[in-house]
Image (cartoon, coloured by chain):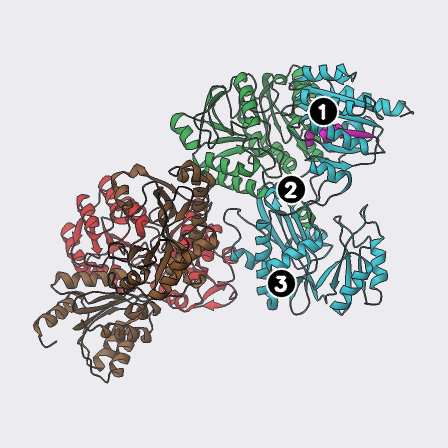
Chain colours: A brown, B cyan, C red, D green
Amino acid sequence: MKLHEYQAKEIFAREGIPVPMGRIARNPREAFEISREIGSEVVLKAQVLVGGRGKAGGILFSSLEEVEEKSRKIFSTEIKGERPELILVEERLNSVKEFYLGITFDRSRGRPVVMTSSEGGVEIEEVARRSPEKITWVEVDPLKGIYPYMIRKLSRPFPKEVRKEAHEIIAKLYEIFVKYDAELAEINPLIYDGKKLVAADAVLNINDDSLFRQNFKREEEGIEGIASREGFSYVTLDGEIAIIGNGAGLTMATLDAVEMEGGKAANFLDIGGGVPPEGMKKALEIVYMNEKAKLVLVNVFGGINRCDEIAQGIRMFFEERGGKLDKPLVVRLTGTNEEEGRRILEEIGIEVYKDLREAVKSAVRRVKNDTSL
Amino acid sequence: MKLHEYQAKEIFAREGIPVPMGRIARNPREAFEISREIGSEVVLKAQVLVGGRGKAGGILFSSLEEVEEKSRKIFSTEIKGERPELILVEERLNSVKEFYLGITFDRSRGRPVVMTSSEGGVEIEEVARRSPEKITWVEVDPLKGIYPYMIRKLSRPFPKEVRKEAHEIIAKLYEIFVKYDAELAEINPLIYDGKKLVAADAVLNINDDSLFRQNFKREEEGIEGIASREGFSYVTLDGEIAIIGNGAGLTMATLDAVEMEGGKAANFLDIGGGVPPEGMKKALEIVYMNEKAKLVLVNVFGGINRCDEIAQGIRMFFEERGGKLDKPLVVRLTGTNEEEGRRILEEIGIEVYKDLREAVKSAVRRVKNDTSL
Amino acid sequence: MILVSEKTKVLVQGITGRQGKFHTRLMLDYGTKIVAGVTPGKGGEMVHGVPVYDSVEEALSEHEVDASVIFVPAPFAKDAVVEAIDNSIDFLVVITEHIPIHDVAQMKRIAEIEGSRFIGPNTPGIISPGRAKLGIMPHRIFKQGEVGVVSRSGTLTYEVVDSMTKHGIGQTTVLGIGGDPIVGTNFIDVLEMFEEDRETRAVVLIGEIGGKAEEEASSFIKDEMSKPVVAYIAGRTAPPGKRMGHAGAIISGGIGTAESKIKALKKAGVSVAEFPWEVGRILSEII
Amino acid sequence: MILVSEKTKVLVQGITGRQGKFHTRLMLDYGTKIVAGVTPGKGGEMVHGVPVYDSVEEALSEHEVDASVIFVPAPFAKDAVVEAIDNSIDFLVVITEHIPIHDVAQMKRIAEIEGSRFIGPNTPGIISPGRAKLGIMPHRIFKQGEVGVVSRSGTLTYEVVDSMTKHGIGQTTVLGIGGDPIVGTNFIDVLEMFEEDRETRAVVLIGEIGGKAEEEASSFIKDEMSKPVVAYIAGRTAPPGKRMGHAGAIISGGIGTAESKIKALKKAGVSVAEFPWEVGRILSEII
């Protein structure tokens, strides 16, 4: 779960990492009030969870006079499909030099990796690719935790005058990474203003699987929000065939197969494992909401999911809609309790494919041929 | 550093381990006030750092009427040389069964060990000796920390109704053991009153070497207090030869040698390593305070301590006393910078032994023969 | 055949839960030697004739155990795994999904230190067809044979194995390393075992986008493997997943896409199938 | 001779501190091969001709190192020890005293895991007379010879070694395991090395009251050692020390007194001296 910049900064401030003076505004008037309190040039930052908001016009510097106008502009800008509801209004920092500090897991090693660089800013990935020696990094043993000698190494890119502060910020960010079950904790840029270090930006992604012991509420809205509350993994796409699969790998393979056969997926929906009939019904409700979709393809290979329970869910959905579906449904069902599942669906007149290739071909053919869809 | 029972209980309460209702009284009047607040039978507990206070009359049950009288009695009781300045006044618990819970280090393994027993109370060591199967114990890897499966094992001696509470108390005591850099954390007895578990007693010894990062003030008074503030290890004994040595092993060996030769030590004072002249002077001041001592034996084998600095300290002390010592001083000095040390002392007329055996024999002989000492 | 056989004596942790109970039944039916189960507080019960204990220690005092299958819910899974490792069980199958990533990192390090191996978390398990199953796979699609299968994905594995079996190609052992970002055993560990296993004549690797496990496996295949490998990689058309900030990009160095994986595998001499159902056909041409 | 020789290449951590500097001088004078020093923030300086680095990693990029002597102050000692271990230095001499006991417990476990060995903390170090000294002992009392010495105490060791040297009995190696409750290397580890060392003909063990290290050593001597052992135990007349509550008593099971130790040693065939200065004489009768 990605936190908004302002949420991450609240946590940073609470844990002792210096952040710019500033607050959240819900409208241009509030933005003006906050700017007046700050009393200097400000920066207005759209609070959206997508990357690249700077280039999309989501970050603007402003004098007090222009704050209302500029924040109005930001509120009305759509950034990669997200319209900001909140703007973070902050003092404008005097940046002498920009640094990078990030922590995430190295998946293969299974260990946290902490990175710093004297070349902070949006080009950091480019720096890493072209001049890897400009990234200082340290792998941490998750049992032993981070040690001062590692932090000293990570502090070396920082100017001597603020090396002690850098040491503390790195130690605290690592503490936050562990304490908040983060997958990613990042400060880019970490600004040196000539006197001190300030976290100009803040990224904190909480591990979804740890939310049961962390105190964050999911904020996602729309179809994604509904899906995520059901425990599904869902992404909207722009094709015509809505896809429900079980397991990320199989669902991806289904998307791949659809596209290889000439179709285009309208979404990715992975129901995961051990889904009860109600869950399957919910998954159908979700994909049927997508107006662009013209046909729904269900692909379930029963393992920990049982085909009979999946079929029951489909039947519940079918009956809820009075036996009439506004988009045709192609079902591929095989694996655990396959016969029973097939029987349930055949009773309500839904054809069941046993073979994935045939199901995919049939779905693509029907979308292509039947212009009435 | 041993904490008083009431200090340990304050920590336990703060960290979530249930303790009896109660407060500290500095005089019988306060004891009465507290008892009235508690409103039932109370127990009065002398706050001393020595063991066996129960047998010495330091713990008394009392009705409200008798509180002032009984606490007056405790205040005037000397318990193994300590007169209590504080009494902990607590509600009297209804004990259905007494359990034991303790954590300390296994020195050879270098790991914390957590122990529980259904046979709590003063006889626990006897239980451990006679029926070791009645002690449940678990060794903890200091890197991994304690795991729930270990705590479940340790909770097994507790009645089913309070096993969850036992689980929590054990987890919290282990947390305290680590958080407060303890060498020993113990609840004996941990009382089951028919409904819940309560820590009737509380022992918490903080590791002296960790005091720089823990927030405790040493309370020791008298000679021990002065010595400990200087970083010396000091114990008063009842013989006539005051002993200063460097290193615990060598100082103990000096005591042993004195007794084997027929003398008796008046104290144990280990100055440790790297002592500057001022430190040596202070050590002499400390042992000269002991009125029972008739002679002072200094035994320093220079290593990290330098003989010249030790000698300078002796000269400073000698000059401070105007060249007149009311107790004869026998000095054995050898090791690093020995010649220079010897020269300094010979200048002020103090004879220096090179050999420990001779120094010890001389000291014992002089105390025995010279009745004027 | 690697890691498990008809002789493997199995413990089931979390045996009294819904999944634990259901799959214990199916594993027993398959012939797996389940000797004991553990669920704290349920000691003394029986599940399908298997005795249940309160702790691993107690189970081990009564039974010899070679491996443990873990169905314990995510919040308690780390405890169960460490309990098994601390009691010197060498091989664990962690079925549980949604275990916090920091817990998995610790589990992995502890296993390394203590010399145990686990597969998963979030794995369908391991099966040596005709011999033993430690996991939740629908066993009817498997067939004893000569090809080893290793996969990051559960249901996709079934799809591929199904195509193999339909082409008459059986399996020595099929193992899911688990779908989580951090897993106890990676592709290379398993490829190494298949390379050494005398029964295995070819290997199937099933990967997906994200991470660099397939790229690392490619190097291993190129340098160390003599047996033919067939692969399928899911996600060629998938939307870019959660991007792990700059940090993730710096670590991965831009790899992790299906193209990068397929390219690396092909360079290592691996036949890469376009569809999962092709794997059976490709194999039948090779062996 | 065990653990250190004239060939041992030594790093000094905390080399710019008062003690570090002073004893680096003395160790160099003795002939110890000190190749580099480390003090964070002092990289680039020189101490008695020895180059100083900011970190162990940097020192190792320029020098080969076999062992490290640590003079770093107690609050930072754990960091220094783990830094050395993480950089794969196999043998550490931790001179620092007053390191928090929980830090020592962690250091010990980390050394175990990573396969390094440390002696101390709170040790005078180790000396192979005539060859190398890694520590703070006054070296003039030592003499090269055939007896190994292992001790829990610093200055008491000097007393005993002095008596040996005065009797013309030299030492292969003299090692202080350290005076703290928890130490990295215990008596048994060292006895084992002396037993295997071809130069060593007899061993001196110097113990004191508290703990059960001497009792455990006794069992080892009895069961595993062929070489004669002479011991001295301090504290026969010492006041009872800090009592570690019931917990300590339960663990130690009532042992830890000088009597218990002397009894155990005698039972193992060890000659126990009554005075430290007797050790030389006793040895001269044995060898």
Q: Is residue A211 magenta?
A: no
Residue, disc 3: B158
Residue density around tag 1, few if under 14, some if 14–19, many if 20 or more, within 10 Å: many
What amino acid is at disc 3? Phe
The residue nearer to you, when weighing C96 against A291, is A291
Image disc number at residue D44: none
Is A21 located above or below residue B328 in the figure?
below
State which region is magenta.
B240-255
Q: Is residue A318 found left or right of B185 in the rendered image?
A: left
What amino acid is at disc 1? Gly
What amino acid is at disc 2? Asp
Q: Chain of mark 1?
A: B
- Helix, strand or loop at mark 3: loop
Q: Is residue B247 magenta?
A: yes
Residue, disc 2: B208
Is A259 located above or below residue B177 in the figure?
below
**Could you tell me residue D155's position as x and y percent?**
66, 26
Image disc number at residue B313: 1
Q: Earlier in the sequence, mark 2 or mark 3?
A: 3
- Helix, strand or loop at mark 2: helix
The residue lying furthest to the front in this view is: A65
CA separation in Å, label 1 and label 2: 26 Å
Whether labels 3 and 1 belong to a single chain: the reply is yes
